[in-house]
Image (cartoon, rainbow, N blue to C red):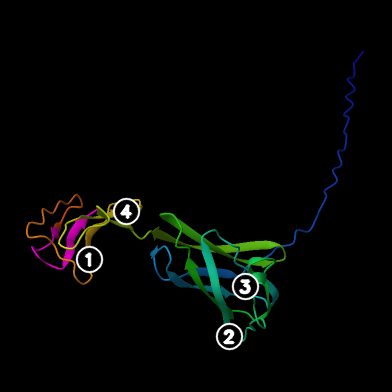
């Protein structure tokens, strides 16, 4: 008798649900910022130029420009100029710029606006760097640009006489102290101190100098000077 083998194949079907969603794409305009220098002395001023260009490929309305407050830097004035059909905001204010930001009314494709910021570094700013950042905001997304300057401080200068009071024809020792609070030595330091009327160097000045270079006080002269010092 012949035997038969019965093979039963079983198939199963797996179904997968694919979830689809739409993600909004925000293309941001370009932004640049510079004051054209790399070093500034504490107490001095500079002008920053911030250029925002619509490189998004579409017309922009109400993009926001911000330049947040920064320690040791005071903005003195703010102005705007436009190119390529863009529209500057009316009467932009420093307070608004440093707060929620200034809305730029309209920017056609490839147009630009330039904000000019006159700023002063505090005379009390320490030696180091100061980085000022500007932002352009579109639909909650931010593009930024920064400018960094090295800050140098002015020398601290002290001047004293010992004794502080003398009689006519008497002598006193004049000491001038220069202090460099910067992060690097200063070279080529020079000064001239011209005495007031009726004050002269003695016939034997006996000048001492710890500042390098050449200190000069001519016998019976009317000034003390330093040239090519290093501090």
**Residue underneath mark 2:** 84
Residue 27 seen by the camera: no
At a point 50% along the width and 69% down the height, the residue shown is 33
Disc 3 from disc 2: Cα separation: 25 Å
Q: Tell me which corner region of the image, top left, top right, bottom left or bottom right, holds residue 39.
A: bottom left
Mark in the foreground, 2 or 1: 1
Q: Which mark is residue 94?
A: 3
Disc 1 from disc 4: Cα separation: 18 Å
Q: Are marks 1 and 4 in contact (CB under 8 Å)?
A: no
Q: Earlier in the sequence, mark 3 or mark 4?
A: 3
Q: Earlier in the sequence, mark 1 or mark 4?
A: 4
Residue 65 left/right relative to 36 = right
Disc 2 from disc 1: Cα separation: 56 Å
Q: Earlier in the sequence, mark 3 or mark 2?
A: 2
**Placement of 179 over or under 67, stated as above or below:** above
Residue sitting farthest toward the top: 1
At a point 16% along the width and 58% down the height, the residue shown is 170
Residue 54 left/right relative to 152 = right
Q: Tell me which corner region of the image, top left, top right, bottom left or bottom right, holds residue 15.
A: top right
Extent of the magenta region:
215-231
Q: Earlier in the sequence, mark 4 or mark 2?
A: 2
Please, what secondary structure does the residue beneath circle 3 have?
helix
- Residue 220 lies in magenta, yes or no? yes
Mark in the foreground, 3 or 1: 1
Front residue of 44 and 169: 169
Disc 3 from disc 4: Cα separation: 34 Å
Front residue of 66 and 130: 130
At a point 59% along the width and 73% down the height, the residue shown is 55
Please, what secondary structure does the residue beneath circle 1 have?
strand
Disc 4 from disc 2: Cα separation: 49 Å
Mark in the foreground, 3 or 2: 3
Front residue of 5 and 104: 104
């Amino acid at each position: 008798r012949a035997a038969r083998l019965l093979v039963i194949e079983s198939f199963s079907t797996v179904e997968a649900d694919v979830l689809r969603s739409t993600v909004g794409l925000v293309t941001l305009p370009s932004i640049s910022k510079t004051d054209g220098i790399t070093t500034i002395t504490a107490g001095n001023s500079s002008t920053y130029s911030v250029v925002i260009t619509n490189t998004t490929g579409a017309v922009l309305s109400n993009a926001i420009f911000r330049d947040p407050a920064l320690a040791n830097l005071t903005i003195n004035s703010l102005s705007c100029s436009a190119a390529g059909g863009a529209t500057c905001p009316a009467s932009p204010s420093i307070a608004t710029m440093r707060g929620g930001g200034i809305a730029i009314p309209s920017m056609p494709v490839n147009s630009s606006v330039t904000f000019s910021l006159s700023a002063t570094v505090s005379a009390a700013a320490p030696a180091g760097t100061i980085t000022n950042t500007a932002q352009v905001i579109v639909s909650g997304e931010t593009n930024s640009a920064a400018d960094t300057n090295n800050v140098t401080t002015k020398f601290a200068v002290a001047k004293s006489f010992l004794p502080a009071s003398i009689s006519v024809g008497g002598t006193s020792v004049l000491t001038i102290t220069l202090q460099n609070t910067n992060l690097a030595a200063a070279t080529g330091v020079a000064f001239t101190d011209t005495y007031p009327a009726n004050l002269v160097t003695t016939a034997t000045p006996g000048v001492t100098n710890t500042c390098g270079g050449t200190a000069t006080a001519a016998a019976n002269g009317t000034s003390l000077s330093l040239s090519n010092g290093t501090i």
